[in-house]
Image (cartoon, helix red, strand yellow):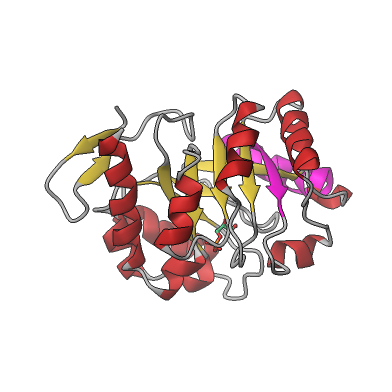
Amino acid sequence: MFYTFSLNLCNYAVKHTKTLLTKTTHTHLIILIDPDKYNPALLDIANTCGVAYIFFGGSSLKKNNFEKTLKSIKAKTTIPVIIFPGDESQVSKHADGFLMLSLLSGRNAEYLIGKHVNAAAKIKASNLRVIPTAYILVAGGTKSTTQKITKTTPLSSKKEIINTVIAGELLGKQLIYLEAGSGAKKTLTASLIKEVKQHTTLPLIIGGGIDTIKKAKEVLKANPDYIVVGNALEKDPQFLLELSDEIGRRDRRD
Ligand code: 1GP
């Protein structure tokens, strides 16, 4: 059992494992913090709410405070912080791990190998735990920042999504991150997530556009290993309490 029950704000807490982002029996929650929009109040809630990981990074940072903000987060929490890099400058030995993202849904060589070569020596020197990740952007009803920056087209065909997941596994990735894009209008459907799960044994992360409990419930029906929520928590940190309750309720029910 991954969760341990305790009397705190959100009814349960998380026991962290040494290996990062492993497969789970019940969906765990990841919050995404954009360094430019860090709100310490969100971290205070996260510390009591069974958040499994913090993803840290942003696709268009302007404030030049990546390292400083990362250090201040690490000083305030024991939740593992994993860099979800928006570009090759976002590397720091102060994090607990690093998602080595390959944007497999796109055909832009820079996001398949180019940026990785630029950052490789720095990542290796950091001694970070690196998780090779198949990053797959799926159409979410709006043009996402990732889509704009990478100049790639998100996938919409179920067959292509599944074949991309399979290719990711065959290429040796250790994690599948299926993403509707930050601020997506539509989240991924439970039926698509369930089908994807039938074609991979890798841990599966679902993100993009989870901004209501109704949308969270749809994604949770498919029981992915992790869901990631960013935008909605920037707007309302209290939403984390509701999300956490919903996940905790499912964990106890099954
Ligand atoms: C984005 O999947 C994450 O990369 C989170 O998306 O900001 O829409 O929650 P949201």
Residue under the point 29% across and 60% down = 241
Q: Looking at the image, in which quadrant does ligand 1 appear? A: bottom right
User: Can the viewer see residue 31 in this picture?
Assistant: no
Range of magenta residues: 112-138
- Report the residue that reaches farthest toward the left: 7
User: Residue 2: in sight, yes or no?
Assistant: yes
Residue 156 in the image: above or below residue 196: below
Please determine whether, in this image, residue 51 is positioned above or below residue 132: below
Task: Inspect the magenta stretch and tell me whether residue 150 lies in it.
Answer: no
Camera-nearest residue between 35 and 134: 134
Query: Horizontal and vertical percent for residue 145?
Result: 70, 67
Q: Give the percent coordinates (x, y) of residue 110.
A: 84, 51
Front one among 52 and 27: 27
Give the total number of marks visible in the rendering. Answer: 0
Q: Give the image quarter of residue 214.
A: bottom left
Q: Residue at x 45, y 46 (%)?
A: 220
| 8 horizontally vs 127: left or right | left
In the rendered image, which quarter contains the C terminus?
A: top left
Q: Is residue 127 magenta?
A: yes
Residue 153, x across and y down, in percent: 82, 57
